[in-house]
Image (cartoon, rainbow, N blue to C red):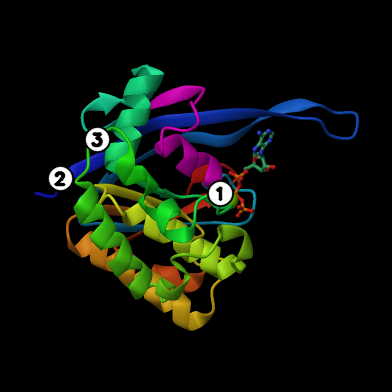
């Protein structure tokens, strides 16, 4: 039987929107339950604004839901202290944010290995070797010493993907990981993510890119905050 890495129970996130004279609350994510299994590749699709990033951010332990819970490694994320939650995130989750970000005064390699230096929970030497391999695989090895400010959008995206994988997390949550990539780089990234699933990782990818669906074992469609 496949092992469940993460379970989400009835997640709801409510936001306040100031419209033309009609400010109101609305559910960006409404009553969403799902589970992500070890070795599984799940695609989450849906129109712009339907709640995909909000959902993924809650799954990653970065945004507390108004209702429901997220369970990872038998722990309910939002009952943990900040310190416990950030440790669990750092040791178990690789997140590729929709807007790829970098620490400006660290070069590409230093940005990629950054998670491995935290909490002393990872073998730093192994992470450094893995970082070199990942940058090679993602065809940005020649940028290891470059400053992130100088990277193109697609290079920065691939750097963020390498960083998310450097600690070999049990769970990978990737938000539009192929957004700025050409079709060849898209294939590189999706094959790399599929390979992580093949090695037992639970992978969830949010995307508009229909190509992602071809790699997925499960496709979850969202519409107006709900899974359809
Ligand atoms: N902090 C916030 N306050 C108010 N509304 C928000 C906030 N964050 C997001 N929203 C709204 O919630 C809805 C869902 O946003 P979300 O970013 O989850 O969508 P998405 O499916 O990821 O869209 P896209 O495909 O464009 O990235 C959108 O209508 C957005 O405008
Ligand atoms: Mg989004």
Crowd class of label 3 (few under 14; some 14 to 19; many from 20; radius 10 Å): few
Q: Residue at x 62, y 65 (%)?
A: 150
The answer to whether residue 196 of the structure is visible from this angle is yes
Q: In this figure, which residue is indicated by the disc labeled 3?
A: 120
Coordinates of residue 124 in the picture (x, y in percent): 24, 48
| CA distance for labels 3 and 1 | 22 Å
Q: In this figure, which residue is indicated by the disc labeled 2?
A: 3
Q: How many marks?
A: 3
Which mark, by number, is residue 105?
Answer: 1
Tell me where the magenta segment starts and ends, as one range.
53-70
Q: Which of disc 3 and disc 2 is earlier in sequence? A: 2
- Determine if the magenta segment contains residue 56: yes
SS state under label 1: loop
Report the front residue among 133 and 85: 133
Which mark, by number, is residue 23?
Answer: none
Q: Is residue 208 above or below residue 63?
A: below
The quadrant holding residue 152 is bottom right
Q: Which of disc 1 and disc 2 is earlier in sequence? A: 2
């Amino acid at each position: 039987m496949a092992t469940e890495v993460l379970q989400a129970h009835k997640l709801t996130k409510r936001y306040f929107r100031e419209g033309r004279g009609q400010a109101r609350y609305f559910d960006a994510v409404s009553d969403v339950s799902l589970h992500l299994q070890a070795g599984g590749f799940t695609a989450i699709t849906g129109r712009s604004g339907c709640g995909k990033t909000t959902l993924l951010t809650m799954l990653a332990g970065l945004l507390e839901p108004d209702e429901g819970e997220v369970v990872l490694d038998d722990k309910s994320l939002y009952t943990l202290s900040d310190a416990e939650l950030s440790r669990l995130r750092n040791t178990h989750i690789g997140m590729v944010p929709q807007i790829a970000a970098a620490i400006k005064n660290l070069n590409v390699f230093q940005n990629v290995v950054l998670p491995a230096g935290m909490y002393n929970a990872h073998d730093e030497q192994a992470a450094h070797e893995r970082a070199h391999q990942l940058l090679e695989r993602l065809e940005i090895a020649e940028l290891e010493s470059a400053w992130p400010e100088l990277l193109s959008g697609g290079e920065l995206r691939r750097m963020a993907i390498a960083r998310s994988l450097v600690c070999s997390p049990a769970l990978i949550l990737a938000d539009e990981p192929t957004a700025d990539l050409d079709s060849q780089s898209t294939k590189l990234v999706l094959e790399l993510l599929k390979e992580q699933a093949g090695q037992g990782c639970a992978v969830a990818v949010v995307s508009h890119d229909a190509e992602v669906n071809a790699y997925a074992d499960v496709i979850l469609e969202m519409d107006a905050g709900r899974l359809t």
